[in-house]
Amino acid sequence: MEIKEFVEKFAECFDDTDANVFTPETKFRELEEWSSMTVLSVIAMIGDEYDVPMMGHDIRECETIQDLFEKVKSKM
Amino acid sequence: MAFFKYNNIKVAGVACAVPKNIILTETYKSLFGDEEVEKFMEMTGVRSSHRTLEHQTCSDLGFRAASELLAHKGVKPEEIGAVIFSSHSPDYRRPATAFVLQYRLGIPKEAVCYDISLGCSSLVVGMQTVASIMNTGDIQKALLFVGDTAGKSVYPEDRSSAMLFGEAGAVMLLEKTDDPKDEINALVRSDGSGYRYMIVPGGGYRNLHASEDVVMCEDGNPRTLMNSFIQGTSVFTFTIFDVPHLIKDFFTQTETTPDQYDCFAFHQANLYILKQIAKKTKIDFDRMPITLDRYGNTSGASAIVSLCDKYGNSNENKTIKVMACGFGIGISLGATSFEINTADILPIFEDDTIFEDGLITDPNQLYEKK
């Protein structure tokens, strides 16, 4: 899996945020659209695309999209 | 593992009741803000729900449902050999609520009565228990009660749960038959590693006199130890991984395919979750009746609420093949399949009757001669 592709799929989980905003270094919690509902879209996307179950604590341990990417890779 | 198959037992009827009081989800806008409430409604699908009065319980609702169902079927209370109340919302810390329902319905002393402590999976696990009792004993007819008043444990300003739950009581009548084609299948699973994901941490015997101070929790919601906590992200992950897995295994074990079922009476967790589950299991979403929009997440009663909403007012008299699925607190999950005649699915009743004799507000009421 590639980080570029992961960032694109992560961006698709958001409706109102411009896709150009997302980079590996993006601290996702600081995005205005980040909420208890967007987190579910992200978990569903990671489940669909990578078949990895992300639990609440997995997400809490991550700060950037790159962190999430590494977490998913470590659980594959 | 934990797959069950019962022959010569059938689901003879289902009924449910909800309280009259309707809360519109949009009325929470003044508390949580327009955007938050709109997003919540879009994702969960909950636009209104019915809520009980202060002293009204789900056994009150179950009592109405059972009274209607017994009358409809022409079954006398003396014919009932088992009363199982499967719920997380008992009338008392003890005794079990099944005894209160036995007494109110006039079911004889020869019956076996007890409670099962379960929430969203209470119907499917309850069916497995009742069918097992009937399979190994001489009981001909049994009543299974399910439902919760989950909202009563939610802190009113908890955005994660305040708008989600509706309240309902439901009942299923199971009957022994001479026809081996009458068949109930059940697949049940449990994952105790998630016992903290959905929990009311205080008030049990681990912490009987827990503090009722309001604490601002890390997820930004205020609660006390006597309130229900839901770790939404972990629960969501469980529902989109373990539940589809269970459903696929159920199809394999029963050698059936999704197109062989007329109706998928699934626990109304939330709309987003149900769509995810349908997509992952290739179940036709149109065959999954939805009641979340008008009744909210009615916990263990929700599968019957959905059946009653879809078929309760139809005049058709046909046998349908149903798959029911429940999943949630425990973590507990299960699936069952059965056939039922649509004429034996009653419409949803609205009721605010309270069992006044059961409300003890002064200890000396217990010493009154009745």
Image (cartoon, rainbow, N blue to C red):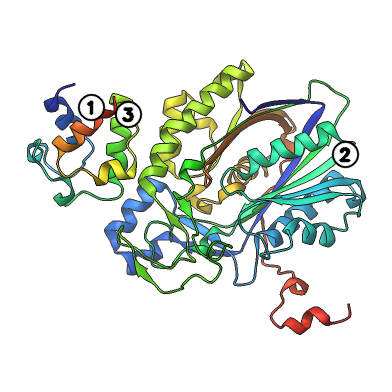
The chain letter for the residue carrying disc 1 is A
User: Badge 1 local density, few (<14 within 10 Å), some, or many (20+)?
Assistant: few
User: Badge 2 local density, few (<14 within 10 Å), some, or many (20+)?
Assistant: some
Amino acid type at image mark 3? Val
Q: Is residue B82 left or right of residue A74?
A: right
Point 88% across, 52% down: residue = B77
Determine the residue located farthest toward the front in the rendered image: B206
- Residue B315 visible in the picture: no
- Is tag 1's residue or tag 3's residue first in the polypeptide sequence? 3
Quadrant, the N terminus of chain B: top right
> Quick check: A37 above or below B127?
below
Amino acid type at image mark 2? Ile
* Tag in front: 3 or 2: 3
Along the line of sight, which residue is nearer the eye, B321 or B239?
A: B239
Mark 2 vs mark 1, CA separation in Å: 55 Å
Find disc 3 in the rendering and name its residue: A52
Measured from the top left, where is residue B165 in percent x and y? 50, 56
Find disc 1 in the rendering and name its residue: A73
SS state under label 3: loop
The chain letter for the residue carrying disc 3 is A
Measured from the top left, where is residue B194 in percent x and y? 46, 44
SS state under label 1: helix
Find disc 2 in the rendering and name its residue: B139
